[in-house]
Image: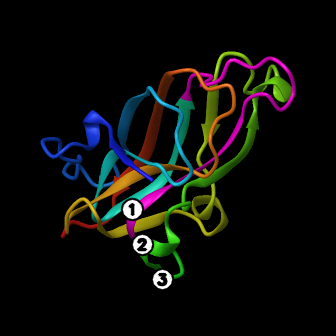
């Protein structure tokens, strides 16, 4: 297991936490994946401020594999927050439960779904806890007391791996300032 940090999640980049009430903000991060990810590898993509209410987003990326037959390019990803969350019914979730809060993208197999995710790469809306319980609020984080990381965790390695770029966009507004 290794942790990789995108430039937008680095120590010199701060999340957008100020502005007019209810103005939508977009946190994003892009990282070049140069070696086949091992299971449990974590990609810290961008920072989300404490008090942010996450309402959507997308995971985008290149193929990351060269196979052309069914089953030749497959892997599983969790997209989540490295921090604590509170959902609309006031239920709180600790860091151990939030690694897939933005979705699990399972069994990505480009050859089997040509035309959907297909040959050009990955373009998936965020889901998981975000859509099962509604928007949620970031209440703390691993980046600092005031910020959490939006992360992508590989669950399985990519077969027929080739290098490529992955990007994560997280849509939010500031529900409360701390």
| Residue 142 picture location, percent across and down | 28, 64
**Separation of disc 3 and disc 1 at Cα?**
19 Å
- Give the residue at mark 3: 90
**Separation of disc 2 and disc 1 at Cα?**
6 Å
At x 58%, y 65%, the residue is: 134
View extreme (left): residue: 12
Answer with mark 3 or mark 1, whichever residue precedes in sequence.
1
Q: Is residue 79 magenta?
A: yes
Residue 125 lies left or right of residue 143; in this view the side is: right
User: Are the residues tagged 3 and 1 within 8 Å (C-beta)?
Assistant: no
> Is the C terminus in the top left, top right, bottom left or bottom right quadrant?
bottom left
| Residue 108 picture location, percent across and down | 73, 38
Which secondary structure lies at badge 3? loop
- Give the residue at mark 2: 95
- Give the residue at mark 1: 82
User: Are the residues tagged 2 and 1 within 8 Å (C-beta)?
Assistant: yes
Mark 3 vs mark 1: in front: 1
Q: Looking at the image, is 1 positioned above or below residue 66?
A: below
Find the magenta span and give its range. 61-86
Q: Is residue 131 magenta?
A: no
Q: Residues within 10 Å of mark 2 (few under 14, many from 20)?
A: some
């Amino acid at each position: 297991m290794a942790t990789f940090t995108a430039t937008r999640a680095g120590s010199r980049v701060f999340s957008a936490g100020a502005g007019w009430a209810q103005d939508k903000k977009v946190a994003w991060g892009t990282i070049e994946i140069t070696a086949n990810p091992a299971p449990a590898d974590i990609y810290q993509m961008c920072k989300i401020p404490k008090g942010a209410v996450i309402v959507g987003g997308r995971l985008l990326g290149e193929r990351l594999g060269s196979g052309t037959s069914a089953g030749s390019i497959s892997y599983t990803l969790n997209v989540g927050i490295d921090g604590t969350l509170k959902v609309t019914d006031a239920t709180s979730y600790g860091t151990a439960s939030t690694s897939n809060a933005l979705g699990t993208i399972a069994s990505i197999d480009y050859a089997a779904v040509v035309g959907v995710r297909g040959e050009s790469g990955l373009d998936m809306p965020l889901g998981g806890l975000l859509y099962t319980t509604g928007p949620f609020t970031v209440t703390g984080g691993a980046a600092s007391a005031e910020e959490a990381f939006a992360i992508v965790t590989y669950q399985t390695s990519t077969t027929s791996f080739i290098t490529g770029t992955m990007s994560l966009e997280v849509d939010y507004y500031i529900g409360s300032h701390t």
